Amino acid sequence: MIRVASPADAAATAAIYAPHVLTGTASFETEARDTAEMMARLARVQDRGWPWLVWEAEGALLGYACASQFRDRSAYSATWENSIHVAAAAA
């Protein structure tokens, strides 16, 4: 099932995101983010009216996707940046 993310999903999204940061190059981050940081990111995205969706099956979060404005400057107001991350078990 695809649904809108909630703060309760922060730990699972952090766990899904961590391997992408630690072994990949797409995120440009060098440290995995904890639950509190993922909760703050989720709130920031949703507070601005951007989507954050999760993929859940049989009670387990298998992936998530979110979009946000590329930069805060008004010239970028219609420019999206997106992220899609899938758990290794679901790949």
Image (cartoon, rainbow, N blue to C red):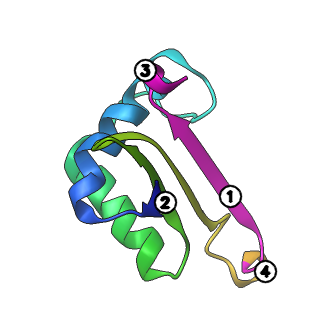
N-terminal of the two: label 3 or label 4?
4
Disc 1 residue type (three-letter): Glu
- Tell which tag, 1 or 4, sits nearer the viewer: 1
| C-alpha gap between disc 1 and disc 2 | 14 Å
| C-alpha gap between disc 3 and disc 2 | 18 Å
N-terminal of the two: label 2 or label 4?
2
Disc 3 residue type (three-letter): Ala
- Tell which tag, 3 or 1, sits nearer the viewer: 3
Q: Secondary structure at mark 1?
A: strand
Disc 2 residue type (three-letter): Leu
Q: Which residue is mark 1?
A: 81
Label 4 Cα neighbours within 10 Å, binned few <14 / some 14-19 / many ≥20: few
Out of 77 and 15, give the one closest to the viewer: 15
Q: Residue at x 44, y 75 (%)?
A: 46
N-terminal of the two: label 1 or label 2?
2
Label 3 Cα neighbours within 10 Å, binned few <14 / some 14-19 / many ≥20: few
Based on the displayed image, in which of its 4 quarters is residue 79 positioned?
A: bottom right
Q: Which residue is mark 2?
A: 53
- Image disc number at residue 75: 4
**Magenta stretch?**
77-91
| C-alpha gap between disc 3 and disc 1 | 25 Å
Judge whether residue 80 is colored magenta: yes
- Image disc number at residue 89: 3
